[in-house]
Amino acid sequence: MAGIIIMWKRQIIRYWRSKGRMLGSLGQPILFFLALGFGFGPIYAKAGGGDYLDFLAPGIIAMTILFTAIFSGIEVIWDRQFGFLKETLVSPVPRWQIMLGKTLGAATISVLQATLILILALIFGFRPISVLSIIPAYVFMFLIGFLFSAFGIAIACNLEDMRAFPFIINFIVMPIFFLSGALFPLDSLPKNVVAVTLFNPLTYGVEGLREILTGTGHISLTASLLVLVAVSAVMFAIGSYFFSKVEA
Amino acid sequence: MPNTIISVKNLTKKFKSLTAVDNISFDVKEGEVFAFLGPNGAGKTTTIRMLTTMLKPTSGEISINGFDPTKQKHEARQSFGIVFQDPSVDNELTAKENMDFHAALYSVPREEREERIESLLKLVGLFERKNDFVKNFSGGMKRRLEIARGFLHHPKILFLDEPTLGLDPQTRNQLWEYVRKLNKEKNMTVFLTTHYMEEADKVAKRIAIIDHGKIIKMGTPKEIKSSTKSPTLEKAFLKLTGHLIREEGGTAKDRMRAVQKSWGR
C-alpha cells in the first residue's frame, strides 16, 4: 500500500512543480475548443444540431484527459534514461503496485488538467444540464484517465528511445481522438465508420460524459461504464505485465 | 562458523556473442566485506545486476539470503540494498524527498524514519541542503545522497557498485568508516566493487579478481599480495590483469573514469 501511495505522490509533486507543463498542455484543448466551437458553432446550429459548444465541451474534456494520460507514459522512459527507474525496480514492492501507483498518478493529473478545461468551458459559455451532473462526470473522467495512462505506460515499457515515443503515440492517439465522437456526432457517419468507433474505448468515455453533462448521448450510461471499466482492467493487466518485464 | 549469505554457482551471462560473465562461482559469508575487483568490462556490474534481480542469468545458480533472485524476486529484494554505479536519484525531488521515497518503498518503520534520514544526511554532509532540489547538486553530492539512501533501510546485504567514484578523500574515508561500522554493529554483509585498490585492501576481508568474465584469483588481500609477490594490491592487480587499457563502455561514468585514469594516476 505504501508503495502505491508514494508512486502516486511522486507524480503529483512533479506535476505540481512543473507549471510550464501544466499550462502548456492546456494550449491544444483551448485552441480546439475556441477554433472549432466558435468556428463551427453557427453551421452546427443552422443544421439543427443545437448549441455546438455544449456538444463539444465533453469531447474536449475527454481529449484533454486522453492526451495528458497517454503522454505521461513517457515518464517511464525518462526514469530509465535518468537512472531513477532502477531504484524502483530493485525495491521489494510488487510490480503491479508500482504500476498501479504510476497509473493512478497519471490518471489524477489528467483529471486535474481536464478540470481546468472544464472551468474554462464554463467561462466560455458551456452549460451542463445541472451543476450536480459534474460529480458523476468525474467518474467517467477518471476512468478515461486510468485507461489511457495504463495504455501509455504499456507502450513506454516496450520503447527504449525517448524520441520515438511522441511519434508512436501521435500515430495511435489521433485516430482514437477523431473516431470517438468528440468533435462530431457519430450517428450521421457511414455505417462502417460507426462500427469502427464502437471498437474505440474513448467513444464510450465521450458518450458517457456527454450523456451525463448534456443528456444527449447515444449509448446507455451503464453500457459505457461497463466497457470503460472492463477495458481499463484489461489495459492495466497488460501494462503490469509489460512493466514486470522491464529491465533497467 | 557464519552462514553463507550469497552463494553463486557456475553463473554465466551471455549477450549475443559476448560472454560478460563466464561460469563464476563464489560464496560470501554473513557479515563479511567482499570485494569484486576487475578492469572495466570485466563483468563486475553484470554480476551485481544478476545478483540484484535486474538481469536474468543465462545459466547458473544464485542464492541471496537463501532466495533465488530469478524466482523469489520479492524475497531477494527485501534482503539487500544497493548503491548503483550510475546515477539513480530523482532530480526533480529534494534530497529529503528522495529519502522519503526510499523509506516508503522499503517500509522503514514510520517512527524511525525521520531520525534515520536526519542522521544519514548528516553523515554524508547533506543535512543543511535537505530541502534543495537534487538537480542543483554536484556529482559528488548526488553520490553521497545515493549512499545515504542505500543505508536507509538497514539491509542484510549491501551492494556497492563503485560507490566512491568521483568523491573527495574526506567523503571516501567517512563512507568506508560508516560501512565498517554498519558491518560490525548490524553484521551487515557488504559486496563491493571499486577501482581504488587501497580501499579494497583496507575494507575488504576477501577479494575476488575478475577479468574477461572469469574469476582469476580469490582470497584475503594478504593472500593475493603474497601469492603474486607484490608489495601492494594495485601491483598484484596489474600483475594478474595486465597493463592493457580496456575497451570503454559509452556511459558518462566510463568517460569520467578514462579521464581520471589519464590524468590522475
Image (cartoon, coloured by chain):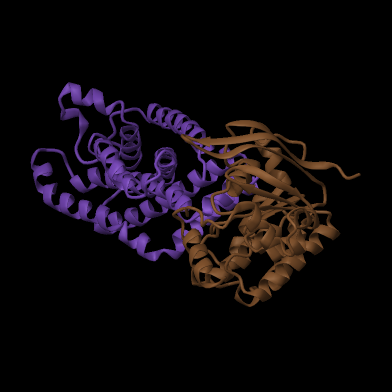
Q: Colour of chain A?
A: purple
- Residue B61 vertical position relative to residue B4 in the rendered view, above or below: above
Q: Is residue A216 visible?
A: yes
| Left or right relative to B190: residue A220 | left
- Determine the residue positioned at 28% across, 54% down: A121
Q: Quadrant of the N terminus of chain B?
A: top right
- Residue A15 vertical position relative to residue A69 in the rendered view, above or below: below
Seen from the viewer's position, the closer of residues A221 and A236 is: A236
Q: Is residue A147 visible?
A: no
- Determine the residue positioned at 69% across, 54% down: B192
Q: Residue furthest front?
A: B229
Q: Quadrant of residue A207?
A: top left
- Residue B165 vertical position relative to residue A131 in the rendered view, above or below: below
Q: Colour of chain B?
A: brown
Q: Quadrant of the C terminus of chain B?
A: bottom right
Seen from the viewer's position, the closer of residues B241 and B149 is: B241
Where does residue A19 sit, x and y in percent of width and height? 39, 65
- Determine the residue positioned at 42% across, 54% down: A112
Q: Quadrant of residue B170?
A: bottom right
> How many numbered badges does the structure rendering display?
0
Where does residue B177 sit, x and y in percent of width and height? 76, 68
Where does residue B58 sit, x and y in percent of width and height? 57, 32
Seen from the viewer's position, the closer of residues B203 and A13 is: B203
Where does residue A131 sit, x and y in percent of width and height? 38, 50
| Left or right relative to B249: residue B76 | right
| Left or right relative to A125: residue B19 | right
